[in-house]
Amino acid sequence: MQLDTNLSAVLELFKRNHLFNSLLLLPYALVIRSVVILFPDARIPGNAFGSWGTDFVLSTHTWGGGEYIFSTLIVFIQAVMINRLFIKQNMIGEINLFPGLCYILITALHPTFIGISSLLLANTTLLIALAYLFDVLKKDRQEETRFMAGWWFAVSGLLYSPYFVLLFFGLISMSMLKTLKVKDIFQFMTGYICPFLIGWMIRVVVTGDMNPVVIEMFASFGLPEIRHLSTISDAIALSIMGILLLISLLGYTQIIARKNIHAQKKIDTMYALAFFCLPMALFLPVLSIQYLIVISVPFALFLAVLLRNIKHPAIAESLHFILFVTALVTQFMLLI
């Protein structure tokens, strides 16, 4: 009995949606990323691959440990956004902080996940877009909601070029959530096009370059070169993500169980988002282990629901402990 009580301490702490518990996600993130933060030899620079923000991403690579502290702050903010999003949309089954906790875990499973990258920055705007996307089920302010969903999906694509595919994800997801009309598609597309037009006009004024941004986004379009696994950390991270994918697919009925019809539709959109990660890879010249971050948001939900559904707290906490230690081990591997 005493052993079970001790083992379940951490997850029990994040079962309560209190401000203090949410703030504890920040030191939790700092601890799980501590190896990379403290030891320069464990660091791997993140990729800069977008029309917007690449100069900023590259500049952060000169910050030393400050880059990784800053990225941890970003991940903490994203974890809070994920918790708010999934709790508000009733997608977990109960009010807890597991999705944010799982997001922090997943984004620390490999050293390449931990630094500042275009993909990490784009996940912030992706979460904003998902919040607007799920609100299309509401009856009020529909025009603004669809416009803003398209807007933030476009910004995500400009920050990280493979997220251009979110255009099609947004349209399909809206059709999954409710019946689409022509005006709905028009409002979404108007919001999506606006950031591209604004960015193009600024580019013309500042640089005199008339080429639209979309041309650059398709510069590497095609089958990417697949970078072979070069370290044990690569193999560990890929294996864990593969296992999580298999469990998520096989456990679909458990994940949507005891949810209302609207929550089930929203969970289905998370599966659609994971599926769209396949065509996103066509935008990359080289496919590396870092690309796995694209499925971190839907996987955070799936893992959170599965942890919540485990009846025995000791088993759930043991699984959490294994993932926590694995994240530290993959960082330590680069020091050996």
Image (tube, rainbow, N blue to C red):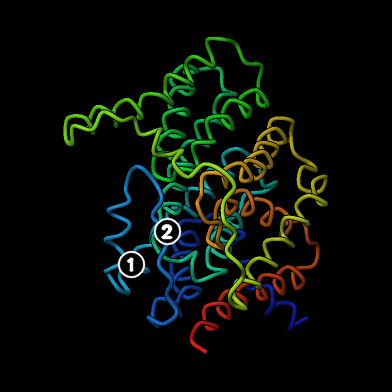
Using a 10 Å C-alpha cutoff, classify the residue at mark 2 as few (fewer than 14 neighbours), some (14 to 19) or many (20 or more): many
In the displayed structure, 250 sits above or below 125; it is: below
**Residue 203 visible in the displayed image:** yes
Q: Which residue is mark 2?
A: 47
In the displayed structure, 237 sits above or below 143; it is: below
Using a 10 Å C-alpha cutoff, classify the residue at mark 1 as few (fewer than 14 neighbours), some (14 to 19) or many (20 or more): many
Q: Label 1 amino acid?
A: Glu
Asked whether 172 or 315 is in front, the reply is: 172
Q: Name the residue: 51% across, 56% down.
A: 18
Residue 59, image x, y percentages: 26, 61
Residue 169, image x, y percentages: 59, 33
Q: Label 2 amino acid?
A: Asn
In the displayed structure, 298 sits above or below 239; it is: above
Q: Name the residue: 42% across, 23% down.
A: 191
Identify the image quadrant of residue 321.
bottom right
Look at the numbered discs 1 and 2 and tell me whether their residues touch, using CB distance below 8 Å: no
